[in-house]
Each structure stands twice: as C-alpha cells, then as structure tokens.
Image: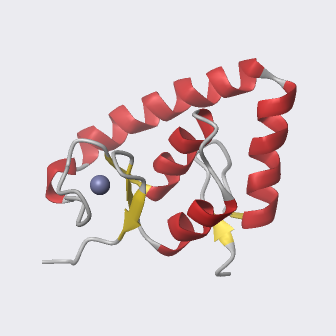
Amino acid sequence: MSETVDLPWVDEPVELAEAVEMIARADEEDEDVIEDVSARVDKLQRRIERLEDGSDAECPSCGSADDVYKSGIGAAKLASKGALSEKNATALNRESHVCLDCRESFTPSPD
Ligand SMILES: [Zn+2]
C-alpha cells in the first residue's frame, strides 16, 4: 500500500500512477474539473483549518507555516497549479505535510 496517494476528491487512496494519470487527464480534458477540484480543496482546507491549528506544522526547509498543508490537500493544490510531478507525488505519499512555499514534503515530529 506504499504506492498510493490520497486525493481529496476521491474517497479511497489511489495508486500513484493512476492519480497522476487522473490529474493529467483532468487537466487536458476539462478546465471545469480543475475549477471544481480547486473549490473542493478550498472547502476542505477551511474545514481542516477549523479542525486543527495549522501553525504547529512548520516547514523544516524554509521555516514557513503559512503555506503548509496536509499532503492530500497539498497534492490537489499542486495539481491545480499543474505542478504535481511523479517525483513530488511520491514525496507527498511518503510524508504527511507539504509546504507550498518551497514545495518540500515533510512529516512534523510529534512533540
Ligand atoms: Zn517550505
């Protein structure tokens, strides 16, 4: 189960290759899908912000806490910018958070 990613608009974790393909296909075929995804991401993001204080996750690479998202949200945000590559999708799958400032994925230490 290591090669799956959580996409916010898909209920189940999907295979990495499939996720990249879905995103690529959505990008090619339908601008509306991207707009829909962006809207859902914003909605999810607001919900998550209410559920947890995002400020406790700080990017270890650039020190920013402003653009740090759970990796599923980060993946969708990167996808909506056309910036989700196989490389960062793999990193997002491995780590729990991503900083969209410097696009580094990381897992905050639990303390
Ligand atoms: Zn950063």
The answer to whether 3 is drawn above or below residue 59 in the figure is below
- Point 64% across, 81% down: residue: 2
- Point 64% across, 38% down: residue: 82
Decide if residue 42 is on the left or right side of residue 102: right
Ligand 1 visible in quadrant: bottom left
The answer to whether 9 is drawn above or below residue 40 in the figure is below
Tally the numbered discs: 0
Decide if residue 8 is on the left or right side of residue 66: right
Q: Nearer the viewer, residue 72 or 89?
A: 89
Picture quadrant of residue 79: top right
Residue 53 visible? The answer is: no
Q: Nearer the viewer, residue 103 or 58?
A: 103
Q: Quadrant of the N terminus?
A: bottom right
Picture quadrant of residue 50: top left
- Point 82% across, 51% down: residue: 21
- Point 61% across, 69% down: residue: 90
Q: At which x and y percent is residue 107?
A: 33, 72
Q: Quadrant of the C terminus?
A: bottom left
The answer to whether 9 is drawn above or below residue 110 in the figure is above
Q: At which x and y percent is residue 53?
A: 18, 49
Q: At which x and y percent is residue 75?
A: 55, 50
Q: Residue furthest bottom?
A: 1
Residue 94 visible? The answer is: yes
Q: At which x and y percent is residue 47?
A: 36, 37
**Scheme of colours in the image:** secondary structure
Q: Nearer the viewer, residue 42 or 65?
A: 65
Q: Nearer the viewer, residue 51 or 2?
A: 2
Picture quadrant of residue 109: bottom left
